[in-house]
Image: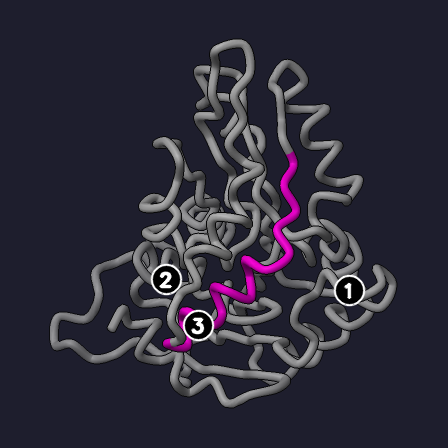
């Protein structure tokens, strides 16, 4: 990395890439450390106390090594549990990722919204509190997709996409009630936007797929408050720093994916 302090983007796997790309688009001069705890993927399989302690410990170690100016927890499953203890433990800003229920309730015209998430996210009290606070008059369908994050991981690594499995995973999102149809689907896992083109292609009818990544990038920019990071990318094409860290497999192949190639 260069001398500039980076931002740490942390996820259970490669899903946070959808967030890192939006950060890069908005803040092209900002160095990024992307860390994937893929040895423990998927996080939904971990008991809640284990998940909290694992994230707190790993992120604490990464902060000590890389000295970031902020941390982005690019994982809904983790964010619904670890944000308070993490913020208490760190002296730098922590930006989380939570289901975009408030904007979904504002966007819907039919009053039927689905939240497509991991099983861990749909059972969290945090998620139910968001619904109670921001969408009390909206019919919310919570869909805990067990295979979708894994399908996204495989597809990003170059494996053929199993569209039949994808259809089965998203089918419960599409609800028809009293002549109305679901018109907004919240992508409440950062892995899912990596499959958005396929999701649009196989959906039984058009919906708004609500990706939280742009809002996360904007929030990070607000937290940093440094306009210099928001300037245009270097005119000479000099690459802005990207560092990769993994608890499991080699992720050097992600560099090309991050660049959109």
Mark 1 falls on what kind of element?
helix
Furthest residue in direction left, as rendered: 236
In the rendered image, residue 54 lying in the magenta stretch gets the answer: no
Range covered by the magenta-colored residues: 142-158
Q: Which residue is mark 3?
A: 32
Q: What distance separates the C-alpha of mark 1 from that of mark 2?
A: 27 Å
Q: CA distance from mark 3 to mark 1?
A: 21 Å
| Residue designated by label 1 | 89
Residue lying at 59% horizontally and 41% vertically, measured from the top left: 99
Quadrant of residue 247 within the rendered picture: bottom right
Horizontal side, residue 200 vs residue 112: left or right:
left
Residue 81 against residue 215 in the figure, above or below:
below
For this rendering, which residue is in front, 112 or 131? 112
Q: Quadrant of the N terminus?
A: bottom left
* Crowding near the residue tagged with mark 3, few <14, some 14–19, many ≥20 C-alpha atoms within 10 Å: many
Secondary structure at badge 2 equals helix
Residue that badge 2 annotates: 21
Judged left or right of residue 30, residue 186 is: right
- Does 155 sit above or below residue 130? below
Among the 4 quarters of the image, the one containing residue 131: top right
């Amino acid at each position: 990395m260069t001398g500039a302090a980076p931002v740490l983007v942390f996820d259970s796997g490669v899903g946070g890439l959808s967030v890192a790309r939006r950060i890069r688009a908005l803040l092209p001069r900002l160095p990024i450390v992307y860390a994937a705890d893929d040895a423990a993927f998927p996080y939904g399989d971990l008991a809640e106390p284990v998940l909290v302690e694992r994230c707190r410990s790993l992120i604490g170690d990464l902060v000590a090594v890389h000295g970031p100016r902020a941390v982005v927890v690019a994982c809904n499953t983790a964010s619904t549990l670890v944000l308070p203890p993490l913020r208490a433990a760190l002296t730098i800003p922590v930006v989380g990722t939570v289901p975009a229920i408030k904007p979904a309730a504002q966007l819907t015209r039919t009053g039927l919204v689905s939240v497509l998430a991991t099983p861990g996210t749909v059972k969290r009290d945090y998620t139910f509190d968001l619904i109670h606070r921001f969408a009390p008059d909206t019919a919310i369908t919570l869909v805990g997709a067990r295979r979708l994050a894994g399908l996204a991981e495989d597809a990003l690594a170059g494996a053929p996409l199993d569209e039949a499995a994808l259809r089965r995973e998203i089918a419960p999102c599409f609800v028809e009630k009293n002549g109305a149809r679901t018109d907004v689907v919240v992508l409440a896992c950062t892995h899912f936007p990596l499959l958005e083109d396929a999701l649009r292609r196989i959906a039984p009818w058009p919906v708004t797929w609500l990706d939280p990544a742009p809002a996360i990038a904007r929030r990070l920019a607000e937290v940093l408050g440094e306009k210099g990071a928001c300037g245009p990318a270097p005119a000479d094409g000099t690459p802005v720093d990207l560092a990769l860290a993994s608890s499991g497999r080699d992720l050097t192949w992600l560099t090309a994916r991050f660049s959109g190639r």
